[in-house]
């Protein structure tokens, strides 16, 4: 099921924290990719369907520098095949001792209209990537070429990234805190609920900053809190 423009827009306006709570309500406890961080948190939310690349441990006789001369090399092919609007998610086995990609490949993804890129390893040229207008998430900078430790093998197959299972087509959302994976079939309802939750959380934040106690407000166990929220929504047009 393709990600609709309406759902994409809603997911751009909610936090990964709120999305994790909405997923937890449905029994999904492990959807937040562990130990990945945005290179440029100011870019706003990254939203797109997952397009995956899987690395396995490199074997020296199969992974010399000359493999990049092959136009069908999986890493190069994935960069050229990742559809516009999707997020490339890379399984680097949580090993940041060698790079998952560098600034040239990430620049190519950006120019092709890809929505973002995530690896549970590291990027080389990370200062340059941080200057690009494409959201990029990794564990830490890593200068060595991926060939020293990683062998690109599979494109657009189920992978693990930061201890989270990612299927092609899952909806990936990243913000300043990190990246969450939403099962594709849940994306619309999760986006709707997170939008509602965000409105309430904004109301609560406003009231707390005015000096109000969280007791009876968050959660809204006092009837007056519900009345006040309804009035706030009407006033704010939300």
Image: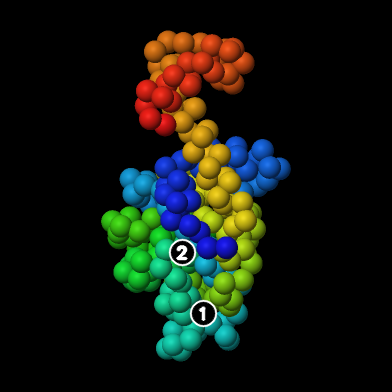
- On the image, the x and y values in percent for residue 213 come to 51, 11
The residue that appears at 58% across and 77% down in the rendered structure is: 153
Q: Is residue 199 left or right of residue 134?
A: right
Inspect this view and state whether residue 97 appears. no
- On the image, the x and y values in percent for residue 169 come to 56, 64
The residue that appears at 56% across and 39% down in the rendered structure is: 193
Name the element at disc 1: helix
Residue 78 sits above or below residue 203 on the image:
below
- On the image, the x and y values in percent for residue 143 come to 41, 64
Name the element at disc 2: loop
Q: Do the residues labelled 1 and 2 touch (CB within 8 Å)?
A: no
Q: Name the residue under label 2.
A: 86
Residue 110 sits above or below residue 152 on the image:
above
Q: Mark 1 points at which residue?
A: 74
Query: Is the C terminus in the top left, top right, bottom left or bottom right quadrant?
Result: top left
Residue 117 sits above or below residue 55 on the image:
above
Q: Which of marks 1 and 2 is in front?
A: 2
Inspect this view and state whether residue 199 appears. yes
The residue that appears at 30% across and 57% down in the rendered structure is: 133
Q: Earlier in the sequence, mark 1 or mark 2?
A: 1
Tally of numbered tags = 2
Real-space CA distance between mark 1 and mark 2, rounded to the nearest whole angstrom? 17 Å
Rendered image coloring scheme: rainbow
**Residue situated in front as seen by the camera: 110 or 196:** 196
- On the image, the x and y values in percent for residue 226 come to 54, 18
Query: Is the N terminus in the top left, top right, bottom left or bottom right quadrant?
Result: bottom right
Disc 1: CA contacts within 10 A as few (<14), some (14-19) or many (>=20) = many
Q: Residue 111 carries which label?
A: none
Disc 2: CA contacts within 10 A as few (<14), some (14-19) or many (>=20) = many
């Amino acid at each position: 099921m393709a990600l609709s423009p309406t759902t994409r827009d809603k997911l751009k306006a909610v936090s990964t924290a709120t999305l994790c709570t909405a997923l937890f309500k449905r029994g999904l406890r492990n959807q937040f990719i562990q130990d990945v961080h945005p290179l440029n948190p100011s870019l706003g939310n990254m939203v797109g369907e997952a397009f995956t690349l899987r690395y396995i441990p490199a074997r020296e006789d199969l992974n010399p520098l000359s493999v990049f001369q092959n136009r069908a090399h999986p890493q190069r092919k994935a960069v050229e095949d990742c559809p516009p609007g999707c997020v490339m998610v890379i399984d680097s086995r949580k090993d940041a001792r060698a790079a998952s990609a560098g600034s040239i490949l990430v620049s190519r993804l950006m120019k092709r209209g890809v929505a973002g890129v995530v690896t549970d390893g590291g990027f080389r040229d990370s200062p340059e990537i941080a200057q690009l207008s494409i959201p990029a998430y990794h564990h830490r900078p890593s200068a060595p070429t991926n060939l020293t430790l990683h062998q690109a093998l599979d494109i657009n197959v189920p992978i693990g990234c930061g201890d989270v299972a990612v299927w092609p087509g899952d909806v990936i959302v990243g913000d300043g805190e990190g990246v969450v994976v939403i099962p594709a079939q849940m994306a619309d309802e999760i986006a709707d609920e997170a939008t509602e939750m965000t409105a309430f959380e904004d109301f609560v934040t406003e009231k707390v900053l005015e000096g109000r106690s969280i007791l009876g407000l968050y959660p809204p166990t006092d009837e007056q809190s519900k009345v006040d929220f309804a009035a706030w929504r009407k006033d704010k047009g939300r």
